[in-house]
Image (cartoon, rainbow, N blue to C red):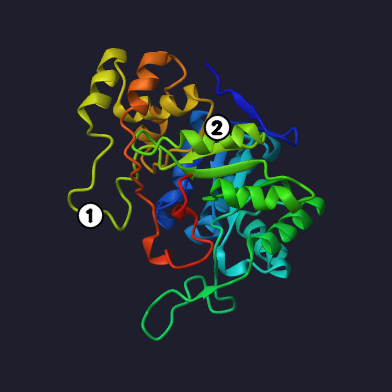
Amino acid sequence: MSCPNVKLNDGTEIPIFGLGTWKSQPNAVKSAVIDAVKAGYRHIDCAFVYGNENEVGDALTELFKEGVVKREDLFITSKLWNAFHSTHLVKPALEETLKLLKTDYLDLYLIHWPFGYAEGEGNFPVDKDNKTKLSDVDYLDTWKGMEMVKKAGLTKSIGVSNFNHEQIDRILAVCEIPPSMNQVECHPYLIQNKLIEYCKSKNIAVTAYSPLGSPDRPWAKEGDPSLMDDPKVKKIAEKYGKTSAQVLIRFQIDRGIVVIPKSVTKERIEDNMKVFDFKLTPEEIKELESFDRGFRFCALEWIKGHKHYPFSVEY
């Protein structure tokens, strides 16, 4: 069965399933993208700060050259990093991403986080105490730059990532072009139902990142819950003759959420796509939602003091 699309509020269509590239090592991501596209993936999720867009671009060039796909067959997302939040920095930042990805346009460009970092001091500016140097640029100014790059045809769609409902409300109150997407952490330990319902009410699609619980995150601590090893997830997987990962991916698809599991292993990349030959029952979706414990694998707690830190409100 082929991968269905989700229609965005600007008429663009995004495949409901794609390849995430966060934490994919530069020496592994090129083959991961090639393997994914050859396996049938048509949606690649990138970001400037992942530090691997150049290799993703090499993979795309190779795929186009071999005639595996054309550029218009693929949906490519990238994200504006925190150090480029001032209105005038958005376009040059996107142009740099296009240069790295070796493409003329993106399908979707997102503001990666609502808070900004000090500008002109690298991607991760720190003070003398090694604390992140923040900027107070308002993301409403950033959004003006996002509207400009869409109008310039550098990206088909624009959206946000890691924004709460109050922050999206602020954008909707003043924007000329509304966000078409909010990409957020989402899995059975953080089901995000209130935020998803809110986004739906505003005609904004949702993408789930870390749908498998991000087991390879750099700040993992001993004692953190492991979603893939949850016996209740495994039990549902056994019923369908599937893996825990496949159940967690299907969980999002059955809720109408775009999902972008990351892998660099060919077998897992192929396995992750084998989710279109079964469907979870409404009872199983409710059961998986009942695991919710508000647990974030990606909370960026060291940014808590920033006025635009998104996780200080309920959703």
Residue nearest the viewer, comparing 101 with 255: 255
Query: Which element carries disc 1, helix, strand or loop?
Result: loop
Q: Is residue 242 left or right of residue 12?
A: left
Residue nearest the viewer, comparing 203 with 130: 203
Residue nearest the viewer, comparing 95 with 163: 163
Residue nearest the viewer, comparing 106 with 80: 80
Residue 138 at least partly seen: yes
Q: Amino acid at mark 2?
A: Glu
Q: Is residue 148 above or below residue 180?
A: below
Residue 185 location, x and y as percent? Answer: 44, 44
Farthest residue in the bottom direction? 128
User: Which quadrant of the view contains residue 261?
Assistant: top left
Q: Residue at x 24, y 25 (%)?
A: 232
User: Which quadrant of the view contains residue 237?
Assistant: top left
Q: Residues within 10 Å of mark 1 (few under 14, many from 20)?
A: few
Q: Is residue 16 above or below residue 168?
A: above
Q: Is residue 282 left or right of residue 145?
A: left
Q: Is residue 312 above or below residue 245?
A: below
Distance (Cα) linking label 2 and label 1:
31 Å
User: Which quadrant of the view contains residue 13?
Assistant: top right
Label for residue 197? 2
The residue at which mark 1 appears reads as: 221
Residue 217 location, x and y as percent? Answer: 33, 52
Q: Earlier in the sequence, mark 2 or mark 1?
A: 2
Q: Is residue 59 left or right of residue 156?
A: left
Q: Amino acid at mark 1?
A: Lys
Contact between marks 2 and 1 (CB within 8 A): the answer is: no
Query: Which element carries disc 2, helix, strand or loop?
Result: helix
Q: Residues within 10 Å of mark 2 (few under 14, many from 20)?
A: few
